[in-house]
Image (cartoon, helix red, strand yellow):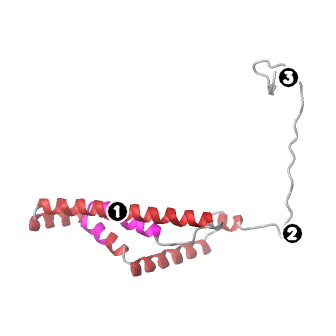
């Protein structure tokens, strides 16, 4: 509602064509930002795979894509938020805040929740043993009749 009110206010002051140009410019700028962040993320992943490691954590690509999405959404407030999110100090602050909030929630997670699942994934056997599996196959001659439980692989 606030976005629509602000757009009508700007349209009354500057004209409808100006608002249209602002919305188109925001959409174009957002698509350019998303495309650039996607290329950067793909390049980072490609380089990490070539050197045999995993991609570096963070990098700001997710926040850049969010900024591009905010720019693409019609409205002046979302455009302002997207432009703010393009600034590196704001990206660092938002990234730090999000990381701290996620860690806090994972620490406070109750057993049986998502946080507990992350902990369970990291649990390893202390002796490091690997349990070997074995496939047991019952070899019964098949007739190849329809409805047979185990049809033969060759006839």
Left or right: residue 111 versus residue 138 is left
Q: At 29% across and 67% down in the image, what residue appears?
A: 79
Marks 2 and 1 sit apart, C-alpha to C-alpha, by 52 Å
Our reading of the magenta stretch's main secondary structure is: helix
Q: Where, quadrant-wise, is the N terminus in this rendering?
A: bottom left
Assess disc 3: are there few (<14), some (14-19) or many (≥20) residues with their C-alpha within 10 Å of its C-alpha: few
Residue 23 visible in image: yes
Assess disc 1: are there few (<14), some (14-19) or many (≥20) residues with their C-alpha within 10 Å of its C-alpha: some
Is label 1 in a helix, a strand or a loop? helix
Left or right: residue 103 versus residue 144 is left
Q: Where is residue 104 in the image (x, y as percent from the top left)?
A: 56, 76
Residue 1 visible in image: no
The residue labelled by disc 3 is: 142
Magenta stretch?
A: 61-81
- For the residue pair 113 and 152, the one nearer the viewer reads as 152
Please name which of the two marks, 1 or 3, marks the residue nearer to the observer.
1
Q: At 42% across and 76% down in the image, what residue appears?
A: 91
Vertical arrangement, residue 35 with respect to residue 81, above or below: above
Is label 2 in a helix, a strand or a loop? loop
- For the residue pair 50 and 3, the one nearer the viewer reads as 50
The count of marks equals 3
The residue labelled by disc 1 is: 32
């Amino acid at each position: 509602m606030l976005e629509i009110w602000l757009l009508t206010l700007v349209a009354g002051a500057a004209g409808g064509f100006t608002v249209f140009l602002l919305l188109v410019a925001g959409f174009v700028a957002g698509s350019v930002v998303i495309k650039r962040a996607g290329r950067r993320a793909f390049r980072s992943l490609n380089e990490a795979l070539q050197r045999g490691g995993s991609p570096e954590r963070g990098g700001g690509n997710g926040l850049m894509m969010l900024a591009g999405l905010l720019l693409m959404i019609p409205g002046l407030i979302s455009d302002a938020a997207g432009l703010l999110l393009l600034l590196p100090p704001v990206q660092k602050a938002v990234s730090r805040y999000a990381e701290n909030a996620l860690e806090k929630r994972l620490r406070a997670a109750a057993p049986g929740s998502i946080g507990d699942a992350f902990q369970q994934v990291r649990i390893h056997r202390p002796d490091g043993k690997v349990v070997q599996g074995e496939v047991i196959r019952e070899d019964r001659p098949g007739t190849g009749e329809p409805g047979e439980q185990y049809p033969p692989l060759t006839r």
